[in-house]
Image (cartoon, rainbow, N blue to C red):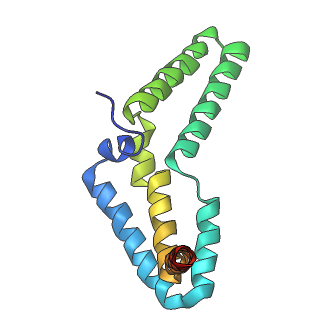
Amino acid sequence: MLPTTVDRVPQNTAEEHNLRIRQEMEDRLARIERSGPAGIEKRLEELDAEWDIERVLETNASTAVLIGVSLGTFVNKRFFALPAVVAGFLMQHALQGWCPPVPFFRWLGVRTQSEIEQERYALKAIRGDFQRVAEARLGKAIAAVQATDR
């Protein structure tokens, strides 16, 4: 059975790297919480620009394909094997969440979109965003109940 989209990369990452990525996020959250609203806003902007593992792999694979096609065209036809191998690895990653560059990029700390979103939602919770949502829902619920009492 194929792993879920959310689980496939962490399941194929050494547990020490998963733990380090999570610990770095927790440390960052604690530091940013102390920096106040401006620090939270700055970090949210940084998260908007952070590349996830999928984007890094897509860029890596397309670069390798372009190099292979160029070398195959201008140097030696045997270089056309490179795009074929890269395509196979990309397919393996799409299905299983693993391909040869994944361990290296995870070692570098490249995160999944889900891991990035965890940090984003934690920052929003620290900032109080969800309290405002809960209060708004409560206000609407009270208004709805009051409307039915009339």
> Image height check: is 25 above or below 34?
above
State which quadrant residue 55 falls in: top right
**Residue 19: where, in percent of width, then height?**
30, 61
What residue is shown at x 50% (from left), y 47% (from top)? Answer: 53
What residue is shown at x 44% (from left), y 63% (from top)? Answer: 118
State which quadrant residue 114 falls in: bottom left
What residue is shown at x 51% (from left), y 78% (from top)? Answer: 149
Q: Quadrant of the C terminus?
A: bottom right
Q: How many numbered discs, if any?
A: 0
What residue is shown at x 32% (from left), y 56% (from top)? Answer: 18
Please indicate whether residue 14 sits to the left or right of residue 54 in the image.
left
Whether residue 110 is visible to the viewer of this picture, yes or no, is no
Pick whichever, 59 or 128, lies toward us.
128
Q: Residue furthest right?
A: 74
**Residue 4: where, in percent of width, then height?**
37, 38
> Image height check: is 135 above or below 122?
below
> Image height check: is 2 above or below 104?
above
**Residue 100: where, in percent of width, then height?**
41, 34
**Residue 120: where, in percent of width, then height?**
52, 67
Please indicate whether residue 94 sits to the left or right of residue 10 in the image.
right
Q: Residue furthest front?
A: 150
Q: Residue furthest top?
A: 77
Whether residue 27 is visible to the viewer of this picture, yes or no, is yes
Q: Residue furthest left?
A: 15
Q: Quadrant of the N terminus?
A: top left
